[in-house]
Amino acid sequence: MKEHLKSIGLWGILSLGIYSPIAMSEEGSVALNSLIEQSETPEQRLRNTILIGDWFIEQNDNYTAREYYDRAINEYTGVRTHKEYLALLLKVANLEKDKLAARAILAEAKALVETDPKNELMYADILEALVWTYDAQKKDIQVVTSLLESAIAIRKKYPYTPDYSATLRVLGWTYETRGLLSQAEYYYNYALNSDLKYLGFSDIRTILAMENFALFYMDFNELDKAKRILDQKYAQHLATEPIDYYNLARTESMLGWVLVQTDRASEAESVYLSALKNVNRSLTKSPEQLHYFSLSALFDLIYFYVAQNNFEKALEYYEQAQTVVAQTDGLSLKEYVGALGQSGMEELASSYAWAIYAQYNSIQRLHEYMNNRNAK
């Protein structure tokens, strides 16, 4: 992708940080424009203009990126069904904050390729991009469903790509938001099976897909189905070398949650204890050495023992969590949780989405227990 830029020395100059993405000087802009002008052909000039925009995207400077993309569109003189031009329209639409403006850009792209067999996969990209310009959960749901089904009909004719699974999941999500759970389940399962077949379990996209599928069942209290997925995921983790201890621990946390909800406390305790050791291993290689990402496993154990009204046992893990928080934030655990609040805990990098409310409430119950005990 960077060969044309390298041919005029531009990518190297940008990569050295000579041009700041935060505040492009007038001199810097003139220099970039001068380098673009040195392009040997119109095609090379177009590609260099786009690639400069891509570089600014990498620097999180969408405003400057958009300037270069718009310039590339305005100066484009080739055949407008060329993949390069269509991809450019997609990039511009993705940067457009106004949904109606983005839809207009994508409508132009759609009109250019909808009867063009050689650009069929690009057409699927455009249909998928159009989805996010509509109200996908409410008034435009039928339009969105039609766009996704059309994109899937195209993608299924070609060799598997992760884009195919992603589209299947978005379609599943549209059914889930309407409470049409059997249809949602079908598409989530279809996507997951495709990922397992073509990407394999060791790919992080497959691991996350399995986790999210289990979470879907948990959200709708289909706990037996959730456990089936989690048991499969757990077995896959143990059979895959090297073992991904962090995601193994997340799986155990979910399993523990399901086991608690189905009154299998003894099994849940064993799984939660194992989860703590595995999340410890994920960074330190030691099952006993705590770190920041151990917090949610500790919070799980606090939740578990408080749910069993075993407050003294919960305090053991509370003290361990307090040590971690003191080392990372210099606060007591009570101060830490109080400062975050329930919504703040959801944003913790170490949080487990399925358990965070229960974790928070159990810590509050434990604080009440501690206060009552101290008052005696």
Image: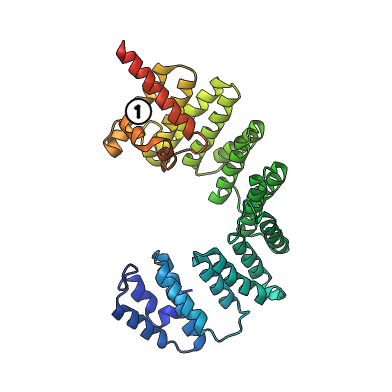
Check disc 1 and give the amino acid type: Gln
Q: Which residue is mark 1?
A: 320
Tell me what residue is drawn at x 66 percent, y 35 percent: 225
Location of residue 158 by image quarter = bottom right
Name the residue nearer the viewer: 21 or 256. 21
- Would you say 102 lies left or right of 65 here? right
x, y percent for residue 203:
55, 51
The residue furthest front is 139
Tell me what residue is drawn at x 50 percent, y 88 percent: 42
Res. 198 visible in picture: no
x, y percent for residue 173:
63, 49
x, y percent for residue 299:
43, 30
Tell me what residue is drawn at x 38 percent, y 20 percent: 368
Q: Secondary structure at mark 1?
A: helix
Name the residue nearer the viewer: 144 or 297. 144
Residue 271 higher or lower than 134, as above or below? above
Location of residue 181 by image quarter = top right
Location of residue 155 by image quarter = bottom right
The residue furthest top is 376
